[in-house]
Image: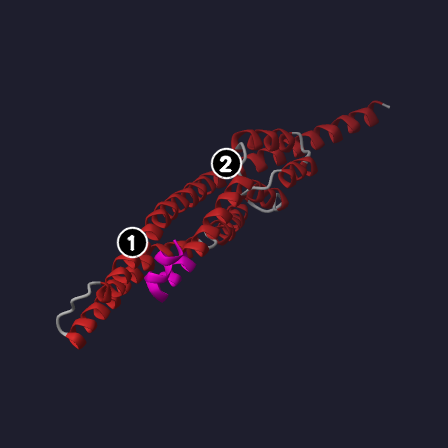
Amino acid sequence: MLDFIVKGGIILWIIMALSVVGLAIIIERVLYFRSIKTDEDKLFQRVKASVEKGHFDEALSICDNNESPLSALIKVGIEYRAYPESAQKEVLKDAAAQEVPRLERNVSALGTIAHIAPLLGLLGTVTGTMKAFGVLGRFGSVADPSILAKGVSEALITTVGGIVVAVPAVIFYNLLVTKVNMILLKMENQVTALVMMINSGKRRGLASAAAAVKEEAGRGAGA
């Protein structure tokens, strides 16, 4: 294996370094998406039940205990519940936009690795071939094929290395991009539902308060 790496030359070392970086990005992103994974429907229903009762602190506590882009969005909506519905929608859209950098973190870097790894492999192929032809140019016909082996080995090994790194990088890049797009689409679709839920709870709270005041006033008049 070490001999294989040595024959690949400096370009193979660069490709290997890129593979380590790409693997680190993949592991970090998989762990991140696993950490924010939650039952969104269940979370939404729990928060909705608390909001409809006017228990906004309880709803915020539920969001704090379930870290995810949706819970962050709900939390912002609850904190801005006193604002008009149009202002709430704008705030929620801004909050959703702020989640994008967290979701897309290092994904573009993985895409870059997926694109340049095969190009580096091709560069190694060119430099290896140049070395092989350089030997032929210096010595003319070569009786010992091993003299050409170094250049040919570098040409083939770097090509293989670039492809081996690029294929999984492309696969995981596309998977991560799809995952991010799905989360963002869900968040965009949930903005209107969140505004309706928050204002429904707010109206219920106002109605309950008005009824309580009216009942108290009735008791005072009866006395």
Q: Quadrant of the C terminus?
A: top right
Residue holding disc 1: 160
In this rendering, position of residue 36 left or right of residue 207: left
Mark 2 / mark 1, whichever is N-terminal: 1
Image coords of residue 164 (percent x, y): 33, 50
In this rendering, position of residue 200 left or right of residue 3: right
In the rendered structure, which segment of residues is drawn in magenta? 1-18
In the structure shown, which secondary structural element does the residue marked by tag 1 occupy? helix
Q: Nearer the viewer, residue 36 or 136?
A: 136
Q: Is residue 149 magenta?
A: no
Vertical placement of 212 versus 26: above or below?
above
Identify the residue at the far front of this view: 143
Residue holding disc 2: 193
Q: Quadrant of residue 145?
A: bottom left
Give how far apart the Cα atoms at labels 2 and 1 are: 51 Å
As shown in the figure, which amino acid type bears the numbered disc 1?
Val
As shown in the figure, which amino acid type bears the numbered disc 2?
Ala
Between circles 2 and 1, the one closer to the viewer is 1
The residue shown at (53%, 37%) is 37
In the structure shown, which secondary structural element does the residue marked by tag 2 occupy? helix
The residue shown at (76%, 26%) is 215
Identify the residue at the far left of this view: 141
Image coords of residue 133 (percent x, y): 18, 70
Vertical placement of 203 versus 107: above or below?
above
Image coords of residue 151 (percent x, y): 25, 65
Query: Magenta span: helix, strand or loop, mainly?
Result: helix
The answer to whether the residue labelled 2 contacts the one labelled 1, judged by CB atoms less than 8 Å apart, is no
Q: Nearer the viewer, residue 190 or 103?
A: 103
Callout 2 crowding tier (Cα within 10 Å): few <14, some 14–19, many ≥20: few
- How is the protein colored in the picture? secondary structure
The residue shown at (45%, 55%) is 20
Vertical placement of 77 versus 52: above or below?
below
